[in-house]
Amino acid sequence: MRCVAMRCSINKIHFSRKRMELLFIREAMYMVLTIILGLVIARVYRRRRYKHYEVRVRDVSKGHRWMMVSIFLKPTYCVISQNRISDGAQCHSCSICVDAANMKVANQKIPCKPLSVKSMFTHHQWGHGNLPLYSICYICNEPCNNQLQLCDYICSWCQRCVHTECFTHCKKECDLGPYKTVIVPPHCVTLKWVGLKGRQHLIVDSVKRPNIVNWSPLIVIANRKSGNNDGESILQAFRSYLNPAQVIDICDITPEPALKWCHLLPSVTIRVLVCGGDGTIGWVLNAIERLSLQPQPQICILPMGTGNDLSQVLGWGEIFTDQIEVPKILDKINQATVVELDRWNLDINHSGHFRLPYYKKKNICWNNYFSIGVDALVALNFHRQRESWPTLLSNRIINKVCYFMYGTKDVLERECHDLQKKLTVELDGKKINLPKLEGLVVLNISSWAGGCRVWEIKADEEEDEYIPASYNDGMVEVFGLHSSFHVAQLQVGMIPPIRIGQASRIKITLNCTAPMQVDGEPWLQQPVEMTVTHRSKATMLSLC
């Protein structure tokens, strides 16, 4: 009996152990499944959150957007104390000026330019005194601001000026002035608080179309840290003319939130002013393509930085002057014509005897040009130097000197000699016999290397068998370079390029490591096969 009892107790112990093990395994499985499900939900949430873009705006009820000014360049008076000041603060949006000690008082007493109002129309936003020079009263057509004191008024929406004596004759309703076709009126904008408690922020919730003929609002995109703080100056200047919600700083965000305006106004053609170089323009065009915007916004350019070939081709100039004259820029935008810009695919494929297991097929979208060889080497050396000394190489003149030094260095070293032996080129399926060269350039626009119209340069006795270069003809131009000294000769028009041909499809096989650049972004490329094909067309505004 004792043996039977012991066996029963042992069986019970084994059974209880197995049961505990099964329970433990089940609990562990539940825990693992819960963790996996949580990770999946978190990933889906992040993806949905990242794809949801919004136009964030500042809460103007908290006060003005102040900019400290060390020296005012014209006689300026504090709107609170009415005393003359040599330094102080100026609001980006409504342009009022105060002494630094009166900033808090101004925030409490003087409302800033509103982003949104609950009204049937937009009221004038009058600022007291500190009018522009040579201002004219729009009531009596006599000069304003002709007294050495704080006098007269200016509206930060329509930019009209009025005498203190004529102020009572002004209408309450503001028609937004001569640039009403590019301004989003505040009475058409609805704002909304979103986010969790303690982390809420304002966004543009909806926009209704105003009763304005040929209304096509302008969205300004700039990076406040670009250049020598030129981006900050541009943002400040446009906020005083447009609705501040239309002026967006992309220093800490991507262009997609700025392009949310196209979803807010799906039936309206939006114009986007991109303040930056060719790289910034390409960034914005890629964002437009990712969002599949229809109709596409029309892109105009305010050139900044060093690489502005596309800006020059479209007539927007090489670089803007230090004096930002917003009315002149807006006039140019209204006069510009709509054109299409070809965009191209560059497929980099490590195939054939170059196939490596850790490489993936790479697709790059480009707009201006790409090159292999000597000019890419100069760009790569400069890029590496700029990464080492970013503060030193922030000046345009210093950058050009640095480029010249690296170009001179390559004349002596000739690192890219006999490039024709290291690659093969096919234009529309036809293999090309390459002459002796150190660089190969594939060009979409007619400007290259900072404004050189290289395809237009030809020898006196040379017959022009090629059609003129165009940015919307579905073809690219291919030419070669003898050396970095040849690049310098091309920039002054002394000698023509090595014309290789024009095509709509190109295949390049690179058999060795060589420097390469696409739209100014250089790197050292391993052996690959590259294919160039047409991708799409972007809608641009041109002054040519």
Image (spheres, grey):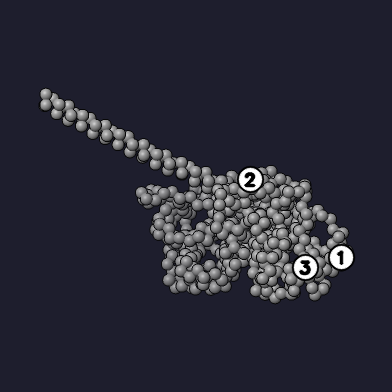
Q: Quadrant of the N terminus?
A: top left
Residue sitting at 48 percent across and 50 percent down? 363
Structural crowding at the residue carrying mark 3, measured as other residues with C-alpha within 10 Å and reported as few (<14), some (14–19) or many (≥20):
many
Above or below 209: residue 336 = below
User: Front-most of 480 and 81?
Assistant: 81
Judged from the image, the secondary structure of the residue bearing numbered disc 1 is: loop
How far apart marks 2 and 3 lie (CA) works out to 39 Å
Name the residue beneath numbered marker 2. 263
Above or below 262: residue 157 = below
User: Front-most of 394 and 440?
Assistant: 394
Q: Classify residue 443 by image quadrant.
A: bottom right
Name the residue beneath numbered marker 3. 129
Residue sitting at 72 percent across and 62 percent down? 109
Q: Report the residue that reaches farthest toward the right.
A: 140
Residue sitting at 78 percent across and 63 percent down? 154
Measuring from the top left, give residue 147's x and y in whole percent.
82, 73
How far apart marks 1 and 2 lie (CA) works out to 45 Å
Numbered badge on residue 165: 1
